[in-house]
Image (tube, helix red, strand yellow):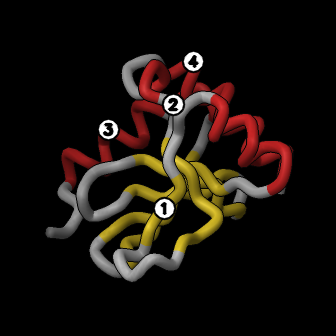
Amino acid sequence: MAVSDEDIAFVHDLFAPLGALTHRKMMGGLSIYHAGQIFAILSSEGRVYLKASGAFAEALAAEGCEKFDMGDGRGMNYWTLPEDALDDPDLASDWARRALQAL
């Protein structure tokens, strides 16, 4: 299943407080960029993930977020956006700013 125009609009609305975003469709999902830097992805299943490692990944894990799984047991340095941020653009953008700062 590939991302739809509605999925793309959702992500842009969710992270609107960040300012201008760009995106690129890749492998059925979506890469999300701010100022040319990838900071998040949208999976083909519609899950929003933030790029994270180290202390920021630990903070996301403490929030109950899940690491991206490629389906074969291998993970990537992307963690789900906390549930309470999925319908709160200000909170989602706060998490996104933390992701960008950690890069």
Nearest-to-viewer mark from 3 and 1:
1
Please tell me whether mark 4 sits on a helix, a strand or a loop. helix
Q: Is residue 89 left or right of residue 63?
A: left
Q: CA distance from mark 4 to mark 2?
A: 13 Å
* Residue 24 percent coordinates (x, y): 44, 70
Nearest-to-viewer mark from 3 and 2:
2
In which quadrant of the rendered view does residue 75 lie?
bottom right
Q: Which residue is mark 1?
A: 68
In which quadrant of the rendered view does residue 26 lie?
bottom left
Q: Earlier in the sequence, mark 4 or mark 3?
A: 3
Labelled pair 4, 2 in contact (Cβ < 8 Å): no
Nearest-to-viewer mark from 4 and 1:
1
Nearer the observer, 93 or 45: 45
Question: Badge 2, how many Cα within 10 Å: few under 14, some, many 20+?
Answer: many
* Residue 10 percent coordinates (x, y): 32, 38
Q: CA distance from mark 4 to mark 1?
A: 23 Å
Nearer the observer, 13 or 60: 60
Q: Looking at the picture, which amino acid does disc 4 mark?
A: Asp
Q: Earlier in the sequence, mark 2 or mark 1?
A: 1
Q: Looking at the picture, which amino acid does disc 2 mark?
A: Pro
Q: Residue at x 35, y 61 (%)?
A: 43
* Residue 10, numbered label: 3
Quadrant location of the C terminus?
bottom right
Q: Looking at the picture, which amino acid does disc 3 mark?
A: Phe
Residue 70 in view here: yes
Question: Badge 3, how many Cα within 10 Å: few under 14, some, many 20+?
Answer: some
Question: Badge 1, how many Cα within 10 Å: few under 14, some, many 20+?
Answer: many
Q: CA distance from mark 3 to mark 1?
A: 20 Å
